[in-house]
Image: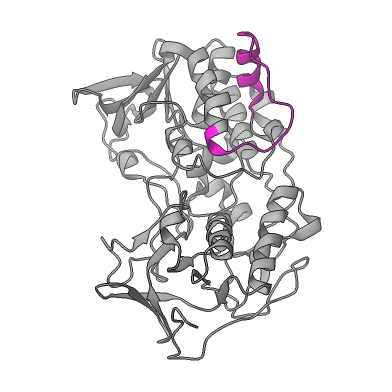
Amino acid sequence: MSQHPVIVIGAGPQGLAAAAHLSERGLDVIVLERGATAGAAVREWGHVRMFSAWPELVDAASQRMLEATGWTAPASGYPTGAKWASEYLVPLANALGDRIRFGTRVTGVSRLGRDKVADRGRAAQPFVVHTVGPDGSEQRMLARAVIDASGTWQRPAPAGADGLPALGEPGNRRVSYRIPDDVSECAGRHLLVVGAGHSAIHAVLRLAELARKAPGTRVTWALRRGSAGNVFGGGGADGLPERAALGARARELVDAGLVTLVTGFRVAEFRTASDSVTVVSEDGREIADVDHVYALTGFRPDTSILSELRIDLDPALEAVAGIADEIDPNIHSCGTVAATGARQLAQPEPGFFIVGAKSYGRAPTFLALTGYEQVRSVVAHLAGDREAAERNELVLPETGVCGGSGDLGETAAGGCCAPATLQIGLRPGAPVGVNA
């Protein structure tokens, strides 16, 4: 099948890195991107400052390709998503040139002439990638291998604690699923953040700053966990200082009373009135008179385009099965992930790989460094360089937190290096109102 290119789905950080590695090894590659530009998803959170520094955000093969054009890698600093896109991803896409096809949506991937059931001659058939172009035209493209780096950005998780949208959540105009940018119009209102990850912390920090400047602004932060525990991060033990600073600032805001933290609150229902919404937990507690809810509870992979491929995903995380044990938030959140290579990412469908955030499924704390190591190994495998594919070049910064971030706080709080537990909650039936 060497006459066919490798097709990469997604022109985000990992997709572009995969293309750079493939090009460097002399393999034909086509990148299919549904957006109009490189890093389209990154641009949607462009206002957020990253906690990874520039050297941790640039892939090695991509840097070599860019330096050949006269580009100089930023040596230090922590860019926003917008700067990461404009100063690295877009120049990289320009260097890759017509290998990238923008405005092209992948609708399915299969084997030529073989549905999921058919065995005979399956591995000898090229992949067939179905697409819809910018003008709405349909096309079938053949590929020797497919790398799915389409990410998870398009599928935010709902606020509902059971994994399904809460009652009254679908289509609710008072609920959004992105970190807010300009929050000036929220002055004087009661704002609720639901979630425990870095996106939720970013939102809390942004809204608390508004509360500091605009009297009457109320910020409530709802956690499903029974304790704050690991939410505030690993402090000085975190290998990424800016990540540690996020948690430290969030703790200071809670301690200062600018943010009301509610633990053990598992959203079951949104009761919407004409001018506000009351959020009800599974145990009957209420957070009342809320003007807007920011549901930042993670993301999920969209595997619908892979329905005719034989893939192996963890049943709980929807992550690639070969790496699931090391990233399971029910077990740990240490950040020490060794399983990042082609062997661990391999699927029952030879020549097909899921990389990047999508490979983590519902698991949190994915870092660009992990994705770059994934594509380096996968491309080495596709090029027949077995030694390079098996080699692990990844060194991840520790989080400083060893307790499982998937723990709901019903057992002993914290982990082997977790910070002291902070427990805050409401009595059943007690509302949190605008004057609480």
332 up-or-down from 49: above or below:
below
- Can you tell which quarter of the image residue 423 is in? bottom right
Residue 87, position as x, y percentages in the image: 57, 25
**How far across and down, in percent of the image, does residue 50 sit?**
62, 43
Judge whether residue 250 is colored magenta.
no
Q: Any magenta on residue 67?
A: yes
Q: Which residues are magenta?
A: 58-82
Q: For residue 30, what is the image quadrant?
A: top left
Residue 366 drawn above or below residue 40: below
Q: Which of the pair 274/56 is nearer the observer?
A: 274
Taking 118 as reference, is 217 above or below it? below
Dominant secondary structure of the residues highlighted in magenta in the image: loop
Position of residue 35 measured from the top left corner of the image (x, y, whole percent): 36, 30
Q: Residue at x 45, y 12 (%)?
A: 97
- The residue drawn where x is 35% and y is 62% is 175
Identify the residue at horizontal 64%, vertical 71% (top origin): 254
Which quarter of the rendered picture does the N terminus lie within? top left
